[in-house]
Amino acid sequence: AAHGRLDEAEVRRLDRAHVFHSWSAQATIDPMPVAGAEGSWFWDHSGRRYLDFSSQLVNVNIGYQHPKLVAAIQEQAGRLLTVSPAFAEESRSRAAAMIAERAPGALNKVFFTNGGAEAVENAVRMARLHTGRHKVMAAYRSYHGATAGAIALTGDPRRWASEPGAAGVVRYWGPYLYRSAFHATTEQEECERALQHLRDLVMVEGAQTIAAILLESVVGTNGILVPPDGYLAGVRQICDEFGIVMVADEVMAGFGRCGEWFAVDHWDVEPDLITFAKGVNSGYVPLGGVLISDEIAATFDHRPFPGGLTYSGHPLACASAVASIEVFEEEGILAHARHLGDDVIGPGLRELAQRHSSVGEVRGLGVFWAVELVRDRTTREPLVPYNATGADAAPMNAVVGACKERGLWPFAHFNRIHVVPPCTTSDEEVRHGLAILDEALLVADEQAAS
Ligand code: PLP
């Protein structure tokens, strides 16, 4: 059976014996074998289907097995599978040009990586060399990846085990009105106070020591925190005033997730560097990168950039990115993503919030939404504590279980359910998923009341 297919039991057995899984206590997990997927659905070996409200790790933006991407990958595989980053190659050239064309203003060059963390590492490297400064300001409630530098910049519990991390990371609070670090009561107050806080930190840290301010344009895993209008422009202004590089991490928020090519487009703000991955090709082949402003690119015109990766600009990955961008345009995916947010998910979730006492807040845009669950709407006590594990996490596990039993695969993080299906999901499929979520939230209501 060397070339035969494995049955489900064998897949499971070999996985348990030999696959070491991310972020997990290996003896406590039982990963579900996935047999196939199409559109917004995936299924197990018995044919049990799940509507994917997670897009895996919020990356399958155009859905599974899009025939045009499959064909583009097959075509590239038949033509040229690999060539080192030192060469120019057709798909690499096209992908870089197409990404740069869709990026804001002066971001015209792309450094390709294999994923998001490497993009963050290299963006920070560029910012430090460009400014000749060392410190990087990074937000609490953020995720930037799991390599040494990216995890040190991360502002969530995943960094704790890697501490003390890196020197020169200065942490700040971003805007999050529902749990304001600034005692603000309106979006405008939150915006003004968050910017004043950042400005104060720049002053006391010494502006001349700060290379970059790093932020997720819309915070992803840590809660879909949509910045108030004016916040990103305010950060841009602080960066301009003090010669600090503005790095927007759009690994999760970019490529359709927020209904735009880049989330910053929603507020018309132009960062100096943008990191991307995930939605650029829906993860069909690993790909990420850094979009670089002309000014920063020029720093490396006559001085070598001291960074590289064997697979930077991998032809197979770049061919899939080209096809994916074409699909976005042919199928009007950005407009559909905005429509889903404005007309289906947003109104649908607001309705759920009215019916379920456990829903503290719903927020988001495009196909990027969070439902924040609480024990008590007045005190806003989260349904499970920050970083809940084990027995503490039971109320959320019950909600997740209720979704899965009904054929919906949710994305859960701490006390939140994120609604992040592929951007290509139909209105009807989204309504079907929201109806299941409606039933599952009854479990949350009971947990909250108990
Ligand atoms: N940055 C953000 C905003 C992310 O959401 C992620 C992954 O979830 C990363 C960086 C890291 O990307 P990767 O897992 O591809 O290294």
Image (cartoon, rainbow, N blue to C red):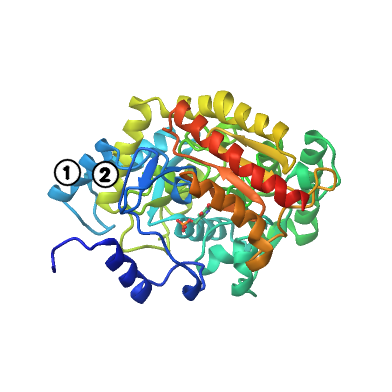
Residue at the disc numbered 1? 75
Q: Nearer the viewer, residue 434 or 258?
A: 434
**Where residue 279 sits: x, y (%)?**
43, 43
Q: Is residue 359 above or below residue 400?
A: above
Q: Which label's residue is closer to the chain start, 1 or 2? A: 1
Distance from mark 1 CB to nearest ligand 1 atom below 8 Å? no
Q: How many C-alpha atoms fall within 10 Å of the one at disc 2: few (<14), some, or many (≥20)? A: many
**Where residue 294 sits: x, y (%)?**
47, 43
**Where residue 409 sits: x, y (%)?**
48, 47
Q: Amino acid at mark 1?
A: Glu
Name the disc covering residue 319, or none.
2
Q: Kindly report the distance in space between the C-alpha atoms of the residues bearing marks 1 and 2.
A: 9 Å
User: Quadrant of the rendered structure where residue 300 is?
Assistant: bottom left
**Where residue 34 sits: x, y (%)?**
34, 54
138 displayed left or right of 401: right
**At x 55% / y 34%, what residue is drawn?**
435
User: Quadrant of the rendered structure where residue 113 is?
Assistant: bottom left
Q: How many C-alpha atoms fall within 10 Å of the one at disc 1: few (<14), some, or many (≥20)? A: some
Quarter the N terminus occupies = bottom left
394 displayed left or right of 206: left
